[in-house]
Each structure stands twice: as structure tokens, then as C-alpha cells.
Image (cartoon, rainbow, N blue to C red):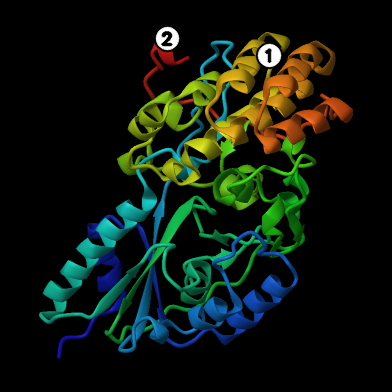
Amino acid sequence: MKTLTRDRLKALAHEAGLAITAVTTADAFPEIAEVLVERIREGHMTGLDWFTEDRARFSADPRNLHPTARSIISVGVPYWQPDIQPPQDDVPRGRISRYAWGRDYHKTLRARMERLHALLEAELNRRIEARFLVDTARIVDRAAAARAGLGWYGKNTMVLVPGYGSWVMLGELVVDVEIEPDAPLRPRCGRCTACIDVCPTGALVGPYTLHTPRCISFLTIELRGPIPRELRPLMDNWVFGCDLCQEICPYTSAARPVADPDFQPERIEHCFPALDWLLRMTEEEFREVYRGRAVLRAKRSGLARNAAVALGNVGRPADLAVLEEVLTRHDLPLVRGHAAWAMARINADAARPALQAALEREADPYVREEIRQTLDAPPPPRNQRPPVAAARPVRLLVRRTPAAAR
């Protein structure tokens, strides 16, 4: 029977569009189950209601998913490209995490792993039982990548890959083929705590420990209800995800640039959308602009809510008009409530008459409570801003937004 060497596997993976590949056994990860259960009990996973202790224990053994598994092929696609900066057009804009600039990575990785699977079957001249895992099944991607030697755990809980930092999308191909495993890498973070220090909300409560309820990525993507008022001033202009702990990392900041078209934005709304447009967009416009992209996960309600918070943080007195329009006319109470907060964040005195008028006509209990709290509470200091990593050279790869959408 023909065997498969690691070098041959890596060559086939590269042919399939998977630039980074490493292998580990299909043995269980008992230590991962223990850590995950501890994190759940300590409240660090609060808000991810689907991630239960039972799921954590199930996830620790790949053979629960694939009984005939013998090897896990951990794959990665790097997506770092030199910074694309927002246009200097005096339009308040939000920021979208880099991994979501291009096409939905779930589909991209799965398609490439399916191509690798076909190449493996042709190479070994037999059918291969396989499972394709891309952040959607009960396995811990980062644990598999770390044990396979694809990278090592950074203190921001992300896997750092030599040459690419954490700008790598991870996936696993679990197969019934025996492949010699790679050796794990030694962690190289040393005494560095840059990622912990830069986190504006304090979500990184210690090395290798993320308190999910405070993470900007959780707040802007997974959270469906109101964002806690005390965290809103710390979110700057992030509307989908956050890259701060990656940008500040020495290994990540030295990443080699890539030019993978699947991870490049096609229009400015895919990376730096105008905040007034996000607040006014219809459901049809939202689905048209973000079709086939990870941003859809936030839903129109979440993205518009995030835009209200972002505009409150970076907006100017002139932006009170659009927020008052949103407070008065937006169809979603969640967005109207956050618009009320944002108005006071920009200029509480100027916003007070409009807020009081809105309180008199508003029927939704949630929005009324947001307005009351906004009127009663002093606004957060306007100089409360999260730290920003140094910018890199500019290379514009996106077409300009039509004037009607700015």
C-alpha cells in the first residue's frame, strides 16, 4: 500500500491553495477539555451559550466526530496584506477585522480542503474517509494546530504561525490515513505582554486567558442584545471584530504579506464602511453588499447597532443629525437605543432636547429605558479612547464608494 510522506502532503496542500500544513495524530486532547470546562465555570465563556461543558468534553476527542480517524491535517491560509487605510474624505468610518475583508473564510477553506482531499485520494489511489472542519464543528482548531506544530499559542489565545503571526485562517482535515506527525513548536512569547496591555476592554485578563464577554469581537459579532454601556466608549470605531491584539504582536507585525484574492476587499464597505450608511442601510442593501462574507453573521441589526456606538465614539457635532434621524425613524429598537447613547456621547447638552422629545413619543420599553439612562447619566469622557497600533504603509486595493453610499 502506498504511503504518504509529510513532504508529499505539504506539496499537495500547496497545490490545493493551502500554504501552511502540519500533521498530528487523531488522539484525544484531554487537557483541552479540562481547560475549557474551567473557563466555562469561571464565566469566561458567558454569552456563548452553545459552548457547554458537554460540548467541551466531546470536542476533546476527534474520534467522537470521525471514529475511523488516524490523523489530523491542520491547514492554514495566511491573509495578511499591507494596511488598506480609509480614504481621507472626512467621512466617519467603521473598521472591520481583516479576516472578514474578503470572501467568507468558511467557504474558502472548505473548498480548498475538498481539493486537497481529492488530491490525496488520487495520490493514494483509494477512497479516504474524511471530515472537513472550519470553525464549525466540535474540535478546537487552535489546539490541533498547536499540537501539529503549525504554530504555538500566543498570550492573546491565538495561534502564532512562523512567518505569518496570527494572520492565518485555520482548518482541519481529519482522515483515516496514518501520516507521520509533526513536532509541536516551543512557545516564543517570552515576557512580552503587548497583546494584553493593548486590549482596550481588558478582555485579556491574563496570559492565554480571554474573558469573552468583554472582547470587542464578541460584542460586535456574537452578542445579539444591547452592548453594556460601560464598554461602549472603549470600542472606538470597530463594527465587526477587532485586530488590536494581533496588530501589536511582534510576530504578527512582521508577517509576510500575501496577495490571496479570496481575502482581499472588493469595495470600501468591506473594510471601512461609512457609519452613516451602516445606520441607514436596508436589509436588502446589507445582504447585497455583504453577500458571501463573514459580516453577515452580525446581522443588519448588530452591524447598525455597532455603527451607532462607533459614531458616538468618533463622530462630530455635525453627526448628531444622522443619529437623531436614526433615533426617530429606524425600524429596529436595538439601533434606536444605541443611537440615543451615541448622541449624548458626542454632545450631551446639544442632544438633550432631541432625547427628551424622543422619550415622549417612543413606545418601545427598551428604547425608553436607554433614553432615560442617557438623560440621567453623565456622558463618558470624550478623551477615553483605546490605544491604536502604529499604521503600516498604505496600499489601496479597493474601489471607492459611490457618493450615494458615503
Amino acid type of the residue tagged 2 in the rendering? Ala
Q: Residue under circle 2?
A: 403
Q: Is residue 365 above or below residue 331?
A: below
Q: Is residue 142 above or below residue 32?
A: above
Q: Residue at x 15, y 91 (%)?
A: 1
Amino acid type of the residue tagged 1 in the rendering? Leu
Q: Residue under circle 1?
A: 320
The answer to whether residue 386 shows anywhere in this view is: no
Q: Where residue 311 sits in the image (x, y, percent)?
A: 65, 24
Label 2 or label 1, whichever comes before in sequence order: 1
The residue mark sitting in front, 2 or 1, is 1
Left or right? Give the position of 109 relative to 327.
left
Q: Residue at x 41, y 31 (%)?
A: 283
Query: In the rendered picture of this protein, how many numbered marks are placed on residues?
Result: 2
Dot 2 surroundings within 10 Å: few (below 14), some, or many (20 or more)?
few
Name which quarter of the figure residue 132 lies in. bottom left
Q: Where residue 336 sits in the image (x, y, percent)?
A: 63, 28
Dot 1 surroundings within 10 Å: few (below 14), some, or many (20 or more)?
many
Q: Residue at x 69, y 55 (%)?
A: 213
Q: Is residue 119 above or below residue 95?
A: below
